[in-house]
Image (tube, rainbow, N blue to C red):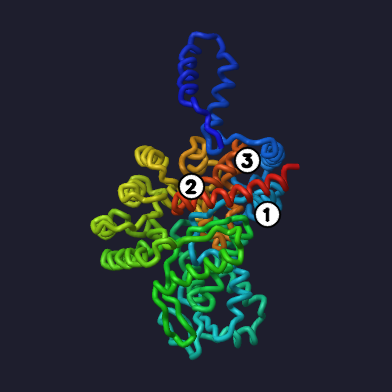
Amino acid sequence: MEVFPQLHLVVTLCMSLCLLWGVLSMPDPNYRDALIRIEASMQTGGQVVLDEDEKRLNSRLLQMKKKELMRADFPPAMHFFKARDLIKESPLFSLLQKVPKGADLHVHDLAMVDVDWLVKNVTYRPYLYMCFTNSQSIRFIFSSQWPKLLPYCSPWVLLEKLRATTNTTELDDSIKRNLTIFTDLDPDVVYPTQDVIWGRFEQAFLAVLGLVSYAPVFTDYYYQGLLEFYKDNVMYLEVRALLPEVYELDGSTHNKTWALKTYQEVTKQFTADHPDFFGARLIFTVHRGVNSTVMGSVVEEAMELKREFPDFMAGFDLVGQEDQGRPLWYFRKELSLPSDRGLQLPFYFHAGETNLQGSEVDQNILDALLFNTSRLGHGFALLRHPLAKELSKKRGVALEICPISNQVMKLIDDLRNHPGAALMAEDHPLVIGSDDPPMFGSSGLSYDFYQAFVGFGGLRSDIGTLKELAMNSIRYSSLTAQDQEKALAMWQKSWDKFISENKY
């Protein structure tokens, strides 16, 4: 990549010339062309210099994009649940799937794996019980004995026996519907408000939790998650992980240290099996609905885990619906514990995933920066905070933008109007994340790359944009500078191979 060395001087000169246009009958078209080129150079990837092979592929890519933008049923302007199959059939999407995307820095531990895999490879295992909750969801537990009745649940049924007495296909389809929020019905009718969809979203997570936190499934599930991202040409992950209490068939449990160590071991095994996968790191999380006492103990635990796993645990974050959870400032005392003790516990705060302008929750954006967050999860509200926007750019605090998640969770309807479009236009530090793909009927990172490239970028973004987004995902990762260099070198090999195989 090369950067125009005197961009600032050129912009200043052209703006000075603009002052003279007021006395002219018509602006000089040469100046107009110069301004258009300069503005295009200011976007994400606008200063990437392409070689001849990249230019050939870029011409093909832009032709495909123009056809996409001419569609009456333009996918980024539609709800993803309605647009998914249209995207899947798109030749442009097929090409984007092949793009080496670098890293996904925003994905959650309980939402990595396709629900079909969960149903076919987990719910058919022996000793699995299921119950139906009062909130019209389901819960699972593996047990060698009949589980204790839960106060909010119907009596447990052994799933193996239930399948023997019911239509298996219908039962499996019903289970799938409980493990995702995707629906074939009108999503705006099924989920009329943010609170409704968040309620359903968290119920789906709880349903998955009982399956995934069973020790044998825990390791298989994480390995499968790495595999699904790897197949989507993602070479590195930073996973937000609750580190749940993992249990055995006899009811005994493992603590967070065991869970983190298991994640580390599975990651090592996966990278050994797939040498062109760079690896993964974990960001330990807690639900933002806890009280200050619990938060204090969790931060203490996070500091200890960071000491035990300095190279694998990247940092700490809060998860859950921002609008209903406690704001960061509420936990200012607890979140200050690491710095008060002179300890390193990097923060990767979810912040700005809200439309409640001017509220305490809306201040999470600024508070996250005050706590020196390394990145901003979502950052959807950033454009409403000009000071925070300037600070994040100066500090190089990248936004983890998750287009599909923001649309599905009812922050925006038409992705062409997403704040990410404006931020990409000025090359604000950002990366593209997938958040919870199986919950949305998505997978990997390609669908979100499509929405950003086509929806945010319009006709202006090109292969340079894709290249810059991929490199950003490594530059803004938690990896050390030395490991970033290694990862970028590995990515470059994949990129060169992609260009060579698709240039014609």
Tag 3 residue: 463
Whole-Å distance between the Cαs marked 2 and 1? Answer: 29 Å
Alpha-carbon neighbours of circle 1 within 10 Å: few (<14), some, or many (≥20)?
few
User: Where does the image place residue 26, in percent across and percent down from the top left?
Assistant: 56, 12
Instruction: Give the structural element (helix, strand or loop) at label 3.
Output: helix
Under mark 1, the amino acid is Lys
Q: Is residue 32 left or right of residue 498?
A: left
Tag 2 residue: 475
Whether residue 226 is visible: yes
Q: Is residue 8 left or right of residue 117?
A: left
In the image, 204 versus 454, the foreground residue is 454
Q: Nearer the viewer, mark 2 or mark 3?
A: 2
Tag 1 residue: 88
Q: Nearer the viewer, mark 2 or mark 1?
A: 2
In the image, 417 versus 124, the foreground residue is 124
Whole-Å distance between the Cαs marked 3 and 1? Answer: 20 Å
Under mark 2, the amino acid is Arg
Under mark 3, the amino acid is Ile
In the image, 492 versus 79, the foreground residue is 492
Q: Is residue 74 above or below residue 227?
A: above
Whole-Å distance between the Cαs marked 2 and 3? Answer: 18 Å
Quadrant location of residue 123? bottom right
Q: Earlier in the sequence, mark 2 or mark 1?
A: 1
Whether residue 442 is visible: no
User: Where does the image place residue 340, in percent across and percent down from the top left?
Assistant: 23, 56
Q: Nearer the viewer, mark 3 or mark 1?
A: 3
Split into 4 quadrants, where in the image is the C terminus? top right
Q: Is residue 152 above or below residue 460?
A: below
User: Where does the image place residue 372, in percent across and percent down from the top left?
Assistant: 33, 49
Alpha-carbon neighbours of circle 3 within 10 Å: few (<14), some, or many (≥20)?
many
Q: Is residue 453 left or right of residue 259?
A: right
